């Protein structure tokens, strides 16, 4: 998946999510940070399990999946895990930097600061561009401000 698509996929759909867990033959990893760049706007509450428990479970899954691998393969996968973690951490840093860049010093000094929306100006993201209109509308993937009308396709929180 290209980086530009990763960056905008959930933003453009107008969806909120709590968890995005990637599973593979080699383990599991929480990749929510790849898809949710502004948690204050696009993330639902992560309250299904404490973060430490979630990390422990994914670590156990990785250990089980990698149990019968050679040391060389385990070492290679650990390197991939570290690169993935660094990329996800950089996503968080980039999101924070983007939010800081939106701050107007005069507004902070005067006490009038309110964060500007990404929907302001020419960089506003559009909704899904594939699929027929009825399918897009039913899934609530028409972009920001397009409510999801299907009660069976909504998150409970």
Image (spheres, rainbow, N blue to C red):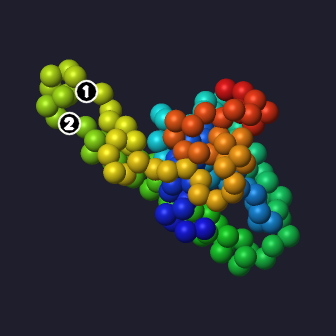
Q: Examine the rendering and report whether any part of residue 35 can be seen.
A: no
- Circle 2 sits on which residue? 104
- The image quadrant of residue 26 is bottom right
- Circle 1 sits on which residue? 113
x, y percent for residue 100: 29, 42
Mark 1 secondary-structure assignment: loop
Q: Residue at x 65, y 75 (%)?
A: 76
Question: Is 73 situated left or right of 42 in this image?
Answer: right
Mark 2 secondary-structure assignment: loop
Q: Residue at x 59, y 45 (%)?
A: 142
How dense is the environment of label 2, judged by Cα within 10 Å: few (below 14), some, or many (20 and up)? some
1 and 2 marks in contact (CB < 8 Å): yes
Q: Earlier in the sequence, mark 1 or mark 2?
A: 2
Residue 32 to residue 79: above or below: above
Residue 134 to residue 69: above or below: above
x, y percent for residue 116: 32, 36
Residue 49 to residue 100: above or below: above
Closer to the camera in the image, 50 or 101: 101
Closer to the camera in the image, 74 or 156: 156
Question: Is 26 situated left or right of 76 in this image?
Answer: right
Which residue is the extreme one toward the right? 68
Q: Residue at x 40, y 42 (%)?
A: 119
Closer to the camera in the image, 48 or 10: 10
How dense is the environment of label 1, judged by Cα within 10 Å: few (below 14), some, or many (20 and up)? few
């Amino acid at each position: 998946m290209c980086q530009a698509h990763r960056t905008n996929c959930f933003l453009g759909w107008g969806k909120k999510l709590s968890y995005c867990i990637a599973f593979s033959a080699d383990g599991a990893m929480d990749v929510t940070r790849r898809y949710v760049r502004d948690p204050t706007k696009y993330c639902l509450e992560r309250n299904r399990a404490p973060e430490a428990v979630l990390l422990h479970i994914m670590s156990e899954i990785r250990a089980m999946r990698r149990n019968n691998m050679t040391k060389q393969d385990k070492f290679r996968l650990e390197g991939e895990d570290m690169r993935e973690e660094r990329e996800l951490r950089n996503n968080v840093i980039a999101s924070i930097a983007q939010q800081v860049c939106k701050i107007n010093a005069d507004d902070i000094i005067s006490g009038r600061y309110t964060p500007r929306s990404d929907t302001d100006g020419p960089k506003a993201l559009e909704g899904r561009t594939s699929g027929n209109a009825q399918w897009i509308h039913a899934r609530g993937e028409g972009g920001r401000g397009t409510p999801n009308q299907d009660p069976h396709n909504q998150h409970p929180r």
